[in-house]
Amino acid sequence: MNRATLSLAAAVTALAAVTGFAALTAPAADSGTAAAAKAPTRLPVERSSLLCPAPSNSEVAETVYTSFTPAGGARGAGTGEAAGRAELKPSAATSDATTADPGKANTPKKAPAADKPVLTLTQPGRPVSAEADGGDAPALVGAASGRLAPGWTTQQTTKVPAGGGRGMLGVSCTAPDTDFWFPGASTVAQRADYVHLTNPDDTATVVDIELFGPGGALKSQVTDGVTVPARSDVPVLLSTLTADPAAEDVTVHVTTRSGRVGAVVRSADEKLGSDWLAASADPAGSLVLPGIPADATSVRLVAYAPGEDDAELSIRLAGPTGTITPAAAESLHVKSGMTAAVDLQDVTRGEAGSLLLTPLRKGRATPVVAALRVVRGKGDDQEVAFIPATGPVGERATVADNRAKGTTLSLTAPAEDAEVKVTASAGTEGGTPATTTYKIKSGTTLAVTPPVPAGLKGSYALTVETVSGGPVHAARTLAEPDDGLPMFTVQTLADDRGTVEVPVAGQDLSVLDD
C-alpha cells in the first residue's frame, strides 16, 4: 500500500500561492472539537510589494519618500517576530513621457547609476524617509518581507513651486494589480494628464488603456496596447491615445493582458496646478468619497457605470452634524458606458465633509466608479487635488508623511456609529508615539487635527484601527501654503490587508492507494 500525505504546511503553501503570501506558522495542536479544529485562522502576510511612479519631470521638483510598517505585527495574528526587510529601489528605466510611443516598447530617457535602495526599512513602528530633487527621480519598485510586510506603506510627496506642473503632489505608492479605474481625468488642452505604468517584474507586459467620455468610448489610436518593459515606468499622455474631440471629464480603464503593473494618473492643469489621481475603489452600488476640505471652493464629481445598466445615484454630504442633500445637485444619472459629472461648487461651505453615493431607488444598485476634483483658493491662487472613492479602513489602515502642521484626518461613518483608535508613530528623526480614540456618529464626518508624537522630529505615520461599530472611511489632507498658493494633497486610507485567512486542517489529509 502506498501512502501520500499532504501536510498542513503544504496546504498553507498551496493556499498562499493563490491568495497571496502568508506566513507559514502552523497553529498549535488542538484536541478540541472538530468544528473548532476546522475554524480558519488569520496569519500575517509574508511579503508585500509597492510601486511608486516617477514623481515629476520638473527640474525644480522636491520629492520626499516616507516608508513605514505599523508596530506590533498584524492585528489578531500574533506578534509577527520573523526577521524582515523592506526596500524600494529605482526601476530599471523610465521612458520619456514627451516622446513615448504607446504602441511600442519605449526608449528609456535614463537609467539609475546603481541598483541600490532609495529607502530601506528595518524596524516596524518607526518611519524612514529619503529625498530626491529635480526631474530625473526614477520610479521605485519595492518589496517587504517578514515582520515588515503586514501593513507596509510608502508615501511619495512632491512639491513643485513653479512652472506648468506646480503644486503639491501626493500619492500612496500602490500594490501591483491587473485592473484600475480612474474617473476624473481629462484630455482638454489646458490639462496634461499622464497615466504612469510601472512594471515590477522581470518580463515586459502589455497594457490596454480605454478612455470613456460623456458620449461613451473614445476612439483609440492604439491597437496593440502599451508595452511596459521589465522593471520600468512608462508615462503615457492621455490626449495622444485618441483622435476624438477633447473631453473635460474622462474615465480611464487600465488592464493588463499578462503580468501586472502599478497605475496612477498625474494631472497638471495650467490654472489649477497638479496632483495625482489614484484609482477608484472597485465598481459598487454605493460609494464613499471621504475628506473634502472645509475651505474647498470648487468640488466636481465624476462617475462612470461600467456595466450594461444606467445608474441613478443619490448624492449626500456627510458633515460634522449629519447628512444633507447638496443644493447644487440631489442626484446624478450615469448612462451605461458613459462618464457623467456634476459641479457641486463650494458644497462644504466651511465645514469638512464626505460625499456619499447610494442608489436613488432601493433594489436598483448599479455598480459605478467615482472620484472628486477638489479646488482650494481663488483667482490665480488655486490648487487642485483628487479624492477617489475608497473602501473602509477595515481592521487597520495607515498613511505616512504627516507633518506637525497642516495635517487633517477625516473620519466618516456612513451607516452606523463607530469608534476608531488612531496612533501617531514615532517621527523619522525622533519622537514618542501617541494614541487617541475617536467616536464618529452615523452619517457624519469628523475632521480632526490628529495626535502628534511628543518631541516630534521629522514626519510621522498615522494608523487607524476600527475598535467597534460600523465601517469607517478615512482620508488625510496635507496642506503646505507656498507664497500665497494653498498647496495641498489628499490621500484616502484603505484596509492594509496585513493578514490572510487560512483554513486549518481538522485531520491528516491523506490519500490511500491500495
Image: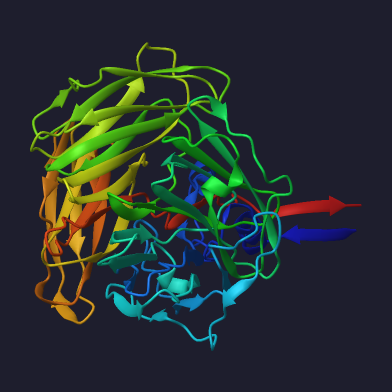
Q: Is residue 328 above or below residue 71?
A: above
Residue 332 image-quadrant placement: top left
Q: In x, y percent, where is residue 241?
A: 60, 46
- The answer to whether residue 472 of the structure is visible from this angle is no
Q: Quick one: quadrant of the N terminus?
A: bottom right
Tell which of 423 and 319 is nearer to you: 319
Q: In x, y percent, where is residue 238?
A: 53, 48
- The answer to whether residue 105 of the structure is visible from this angle is yes
Q: In x, y percent, where is residue 268?
A: 37, 53
Tell which of 489 and 475 is nearer to you: 489
Tell which of 397 and 249 is nearer to you: 249
Relative to residue 254, is residue 389 drawn left or right? Answer: left
Residue drawn at (27%, 49%) of the image: 272
Residue drawn at (48%, 33%) of the image: 283
Residue 64 image-quadrant placement: bottom left
Q: How is the image coloured?
A: rainbow
Relative to residue 438, is residue 246 drawn left or right? Answer: right
Q: In x, y percent, where is residue 471?
A: 29, 37
Relative to residue 184, is residue 372 drawn left or right? Answer: left
Residue drawn at (24%, 29%) of the image: 344
